[in-house]
Amino acid sequence: MNNKVGIERCAAYEAGEVYEALKKAVNLAGGLDVAGKKVLLKPNIVFDSPPAKAIVTHPVFLEAAIRLVKEMGAASITVGDSPGLQGPNFTARSSGLGEKALQCGAQWADFTKDRIDIPCPGGKVIKSFSLTDAVKEADCIISLPKLKTHQLMIYTGAMKNLFGLVPSVVKSSFHVRFPTREAFASMVVDLNLAVKPAYAFMDAITGMEGPGPSAGTPRDIGLVLASSNLLAMDAAASFIIGYPPETIPVSREALSRGIWLKDFNEIEYPGLDPADLRIPDFIKVPLKKSNNQVLDFILPKKLRHFRESLTPRPEVQNSVCVRCGDCTRICGSKAMSLEGQGLEKKVVIDYKRCIRCYCCHEICPVKAIEIKKVKLREALRRA
């Protein structure tokens, strides 16, 4: 691991163009040693969605990654991910990622088949993770994130992408255990310590802006990033879309550990510089104006509850909802339920139980769940 991030321009998902851009980015970042190793490529699949929606890592980008590590002498290549509601025998059919992996000579892993406990003795909030068995079989794990915003974590990239190594709906329990951005960020950083990813290739050709990671809007960015330092990559990518890296919970927590970087100024850019690539009108998830733990401590319980009641909450648009029940199954706090019969059936949210993890918003296949600010009048009434 070094501090270099290779960034190359790539205008479209044309196989040859993506491959050349990725190869150049890897070379700029100091190369990659996979000769004779079993490689696990971990794309980002929030749910199995057509690539044009920019929710998943594009299959052409996966093709370039497989071709590159194969030419570098990898002994075997496995591809896999675990969306929030993945059942057994998931093949990523709609996204085309499963088929693309097999076409390129890689294996597709079922992340729900077997699990393994991975120790994390240096973890801050977790000392052991139960992950897909594919982790045990790999000599080298490469994260393949999509550059996107994220309603809970502000931005999602190389480090956050590895949360998909936790099988299927088990992920929702982590949101219950670590309900705040800061606690969840600590868990994600612990996960990276445990699995020790070797590298990351980022698909930033088309990213997502607005209410990501699944209900936002595709945004052409035209870049490919590569680095052996996942924190350095995330810092570069978040800066490009307008977030200072210290404002991103996962990046801030990872920096505090002093393992990947001690200062964001240590990052080297042998090729393109993020300062020259910044997108001023990128639609971002708003940052919280304050997160004062001392204030939380001294405020009376009633006032703390009132401030929490102002936190943006998920709301179901019944005119769009198809009553599939995915949101009720992913909800770790059991705050959502399908009630009523026939045409009167609808999703009901118990906001007293809702922890604002926004998993329902993330998983909804028809974008029927919106994250909305709570009006002061309503917050006062509920307080």
Image: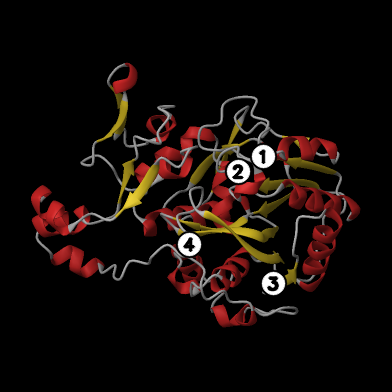
* Residue at the disc numbered 2: 45
Residue position marked by numbered label 3 in the rendering: 5
* Type of amino acid at the residue the image marks with label 1: Ser
Task: Please tell me whether mark 4 sits on a helix, a strand or a loop.
Answer: helix
Where is mark 1, residue-wise?
95
Q: CA distance from mark 4 to mark 2?
A: 19 Å
> With 285 as the anchor, is 233 left or right in this view?
right
Amino acid on which the number 3 mark rests in the picture = Val
Q: CA distance from mark 3 to mark 2?
A: 24 Å
Instruction: For label 1, count other residues whose C-alpha is less than 10 Å away and answer few (under 14), some (14-19) or many (20+).
Output: many
Between tags 4 and 1, which lies in front? 1
Give the residue pinned by disc 4: 250
Q: CA distance from mark 4 to mark 1?
A: 27 Å
Asked if disc 1 and disc 2 are in contact, CB closer than 8 Å, the reply is: yes
Return the disc, 4 or 2, that comes first in the chain's sequence.
Answer: 2
Query: For the residue labelled by badge 1, is the local secondary structure a helix, a strand or a loop?
Result: loop
